[in-house]
Image: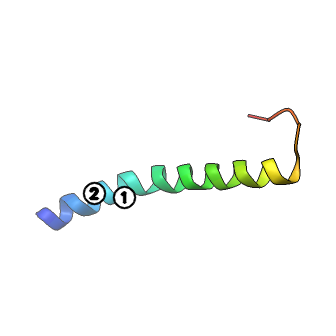
Amino acid sequence: MKSRLLRMALTWVAPIVIGYIVKKVEERMSRKTQPKQIPQN
């Protein structure tokens, strides 16, 4: 039961964490490659 809850929590949290990391990395990359440009949402 505990492992099932942990797995559920991981499957729910993992995409959010990954998305956050990817967003940060992309922001850093775009900042390096395209300075002073209007950000596209």
Residue 20 or residue 10, whichever sits in front: 20
> Which residue sits at x=27%, y=63%?
7
Query: Which residue has dot 2 on it?
Result: 8
The image shows residue 9 at horizontal and vertical percentages of: 29, 54
Amino acid type of disc 2? Met
Q: Is the residue under label 2 in contact with that under label 1 (CB below 8 Å)? A: yes
Is residue 29 positioned above or below 37 on the image?
A: below
The image shows residue 29 at horizontal and vertical percentages of: 76, 55
Query: Which residue has dot 1 on it?
Result: 11
The image shows residue 22 at horizontal and vertical percentages of: 61, 55
Is residue 2 positioned above or below 26 on the image?
A: below
Pointer 2 local density, CA inside 10 Å: few below 14, some 14–19, many at least 20? few
Which scheme is used to colour this image of the protein?
A: rainbow
**Element type where label 2 sits in the image:** helix
**Element type where label 1 sits in the image:** helix
Pointer 1 local density, CA inside 10 Å: few below 14, some 14–19, many at least 20? few
**Quarter of the figure with the N terminus:** bottom left
Residue at the left extreme? Answer: 1
**Quarter of the figure with the C terminus:** top right
Residue 32 or residue 14, whichever sits in front: 32
3D distance between C-alphas at marks 1 and 2? 5 Å
Left or right, 5 with reference to 41? left
Left or right, 37 with reference to 22? right
